[in-house]
Image: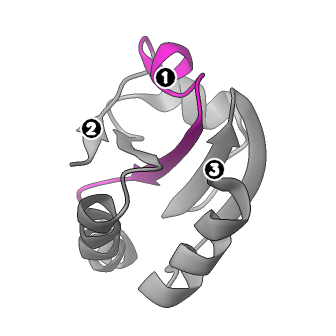
């Protein structure tokens, strides 16, 4: 399951373990391609907390993180950003990247 998070819940939702945050918007074509990849990985992996944040509804976190293009995927481990991917990322590549950080 992919949890929708907000500017207000971002820090709390992503402070423990490995978290992937998908920064997206409803009007973004590549975001609509990325979403099923995230959903599929969320079903397969229990070792990562999958979240998504609509940048139109929650602009503050995206601004603080300097996100200028979407989709952008941020990976955090124990509250610290450890990776950032901009643009569409295929499932196999994203799975391999997550393997580097998940226990």
Magenta residue check for 25: yes
Which dot marks residue 64? none
Mark 3, secondary structure of its residue: strand
> In this view of the protein, can residue 99 be seen by the observer?
yes
Mark 1, secondary structure of its residue: helix
Cα–Cα gap, marks 3 and 1? 13 Å
Marks 3 and 1, the one that precedes in the sequence: 1
Q: To which quarter of the image does residue 49 belong?
A: top left
**Relative to 78, residue 74 above or below:** below
Q: In the figure, is residue 92 to the left or right of 100?
A: left
| Residue 22 coordinates in the image, percent (x, y) | 45, 52
**Relative to 72, residue 47 above or below:** above
Which dot marks residue 10? 1
User: Residue at point 52% right, 80% down?
Assistant: 89
Disc 1 crowd, CA 10 A, few/some/many (<14, 14-19, 20+): some
**Relative to 63, residue 93 above or below:** below
Q: To which quarter of the image does residue 38 belong?
A: bottom left
Cα–Cα gap, marks 2 and 3? 15 Å
User: Residue at point 56% right, 58% down?
Assistant: 73
Foreground residue among 42 and 87:
42
The magenta stretch spans which residues?
8-27
Is there a contact, CB below 8 Å, between mark 2 and mark 3?
no
Disc 2 crowd, CA 10 A, few/some/many (<14, 14-19, 20+): few
The residue that mark 2 highlights is 3
The residue that mark 3 highlights is 75
**Relative to 58, residue 40 above or below:** below
Magenta residue check for 52: no
Is there a contact, CB below 8 Å, between mark 1 and mark 2?
no
Q: In the figure, is residue 1 to the left or right of 53?
A: left
Cα–Cα gap, marks 1 and 2? 11 Å
Marks 1 and 2, the one that precedes in the sequence: 2
């Amino acid at each position: 399951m992919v949890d929708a998070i907000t500017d207000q819940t971002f820090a709390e939702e992503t402070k423990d373990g490995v978290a992937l945050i998908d920064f997206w918007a409803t009007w973004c074509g590549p975001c609509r391609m990325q979403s099923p990849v995230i959903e599929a990985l969320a079903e397969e992996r229990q070792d990562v907390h999958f979240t998504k944040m609509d940048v139109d509804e929650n602009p503050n976190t995206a601004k603080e993180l300097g996100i200028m293009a979407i989709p952008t995927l941020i990976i955090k481990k124990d509250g610290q950003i450890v990776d950032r991917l901009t643009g569409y990322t295929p499932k196999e590549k994203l799975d391999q990247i997550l393997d580097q950080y998940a226990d």
